[in-house]
Image (tube, helix red, strand yellow):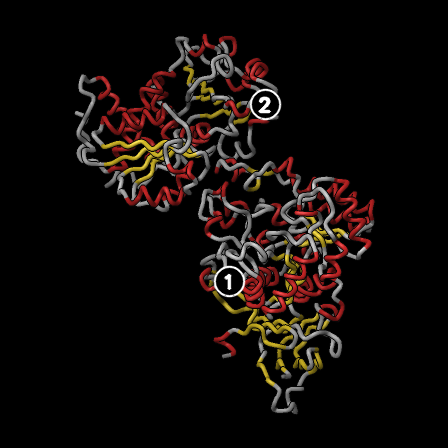
Amino acid sequence: MNPYPHKHLLGIEELSALDLGTVLDLGERFTEIATRPIKKVPTLRGKTVINLFLEPSTRTRTSFEIAAKRLSADAVNISGTASSTVKGETLLDTVHNIDAMSPDVVVLRHAQAGAAAFVAARIRAAVVNAGDGAHEHPTQALLDCSTIRAHKGRIAGLVVAICGDIAHSRVARSNLFALTRLGAEVRLAGPRTLLPPGLTEMGGLVFDRIEPALEGADVVMMLRIQKERIGSPLFPNTREYSRYFGLNEARLALAKPDAIVMHPGPVNRGVELDPAVADGARSVILEQVARGVAIRMAVLYLLAGGGEAAVE
Amino acid sequence: MDLCLRGGRVIDPGRSLDSEADVLLSGGLVARIEPGIVNGLPVSTRVVDARGLWVVPGLIDLHTHLREPGQEYKEDIASGTAAAVAGGFTAVCAMPNTVPPNDCRAVTQLIVERASAAGRARVYPIGAVSKGQRGEELAEIGEMKDAGIVAISDDGRPVMNAELLRRAMEYARTFGLPLIQHCEDLTLSCGGAMNEGLVSTRAGIRAQPPAAESSMVARDLEICALTGARYHVAHVSTAESVELVRAAKRRGLPVTCEVTPHHLTLTDEACARYDTNAKCNPPLRSESDRLALVEGLRDGTIDAIATDHAPHSILEKDVEFEQAAFGMIGLETAVALSLALVRTGVIGPGRLVALLSANPAAFLGLGPRGGSLAPGTSIADVTVIDPEAPWAVRPDGLRSRSKNTPFGGTDMRGRAVMTIVDGRIAFAEETRFG
């Protein structure tokens, strides 16, 4: 029986707790490969992975590329500025062209919600959503869960505070789905301008100040304030945002003494995260990046239908 | 040739008529409505068996986009009126957002001439409020009236400027024309692609709050009171808007409103899987909004059912959700979707016919030229409906040039089986009438 009963990874929302466990367990087994002198296994030899990044991204694209290469897949990167999309080609035509080259997996980053589902419905390859607008970023949530599990030994019963721009964050949505499905209490905090309707129905506990959300938290996840929000009517400026909604050491003291601090990156130092906290002992931000490679190896492995999991 | 519709259930809400009778159409008019007149007619009269069917005054759509001139790849007057008669509509009002927009006499005349040449449904053009629908200066409303417009609207481009709206309403009143507003405060909707709520948050789609509509309805109603001009809310979609219109009617304001079959049927859940065919503006709302629309129909607050038939090709629809054009086709599914209200007991057949025919006719001031079946005076525009016929929506089988409907594959009950315009059969279901 296929342990992962889906053709694509479009969002966490359609995954069960069992599916999540499958990916997390496999990701943990793959973390060991990064410690080897030769960080490569032949598992996906002969498979083609296309990283189609139609929105700027460095770390997620690099992470997927390294993941594919460590599994011996042939990885090709198409980025937004290099692809035909700037010449006015529609996503539909881009998809048809890529489909014609018979890749096994297409990893898609796109600025619009639903783009991954759009592509998945029109292509033979398996599709991994690497972020579609404000919808989902499933591999980020998986690597976050993997990091949390490594530090806390479990996810069920933990209190996780996700703070910042919930409204525009695909990371917040994917983590909300993943963490609630795995039994955590998820608190969502930010100014009301950045809290969309429906979060309670989606299983979150909603706070308009971050202090009560931080109280007794096991995990604090800070979200990036995107530059394009600055100057919009959502908040006055980064100075005031940082003053009321940024994570500093005083606020972090409200969380549990052993709470970990996470951030999907890239960090706006001094805006949502005080540098002392970002670089502090409780920050696991770089570990998230390291685990991202292993989780993406697990996802590519499961979707590309590799042979024996050559982990041993 | 004279035409006799035999033995149908004749429903004419204007005269509180709902009984079985034969209907004789002669000389472009409704000649007689009585039981048993089929016996003793000259053999030259064509007799249509309407037993078990409804015979009603021709349906009139207050809100249609025919796309001609300028976007004939989506629809043109010939294909749009073919869809209209196939859906039971003997007349449609053509919204002015063509390319160029219908903002002057020449465009109005072109629409009238093309409609006449197509020879299917009647087309009543609606003129733009402002030149180029830009919301800056008044369009040549008087000349367009002379050329045949029945109302003014900048549909799709709401009149944001309050003074322009005031002056447009005053000026339109001078020419006896109502103003139809697509209510959407653009500074509040901010380009949102669907209704703001749980579904948009879950899907991560930029959304517009219901208040973007109702806040403009509230403002406009005050300008309606200021000017005393006739004001019509297009495709009302929120509970708050319905309540505002209800209260305005109690105040005695000259206000009317319409609702679409899709807003009565679907909710924003239809957008949850990024179905661009469910993307329309105003967007599909929540279930509580939908129920408020149904209640507004039941209690008389809402005056008409109008399709907002908005054809778009796959170029505008087979794209990412936020990039897709707003709108869905509706002429050929309106009767079936509306009949569901009768089947569920919300309204009776007479009220349904009022919403689809008599009230739109009254709004347009058609008199005997539509919306009634008065022997000797009414024009011979008649729709014959089978209220129970089961069918499934096959987009490829629809007459509209565009296929952008979210109801593809949906099982329906009830449809128009014959549409008669000016005494001539403009559409007849082939399998039934050969």
- Among the 4 quarters of the image, the one containing residue A264: top left
The quarter of the picture where the C terminus of chain A appears is: top left
* Residue type pointed to by label 1: Met
Q: Which residue is mark 1?
A: B412
Q: Given this view, does label 1 or label 2 mark the residue nearer the observer?
A: 2
Front position in the image: A183 or A79? A79
Query: x, y percentage for residue B50?
Result: 59, 78
Query: x, y percentage for residue B223?
Result: 79, 44
Query: x, y percentage for residue B66?
Result: 58, 58
Q: Residue at x 24, y 25 (%)?
A: A29
Q: Which residue is mark 2?
A: A231
Few, some or many C-alpha atoms within 10 Å of disc 2 (few <14, some 14-19, many ≥20)? few
Chain for disc number 2: A
Front position in the image: A4 or B104? B104
State the mark number for residue A284: none
Q: Secondary structure at mark 2?
A: loop
Residue at the extreme front: B106
Left or right of B143 in this view: A44: left
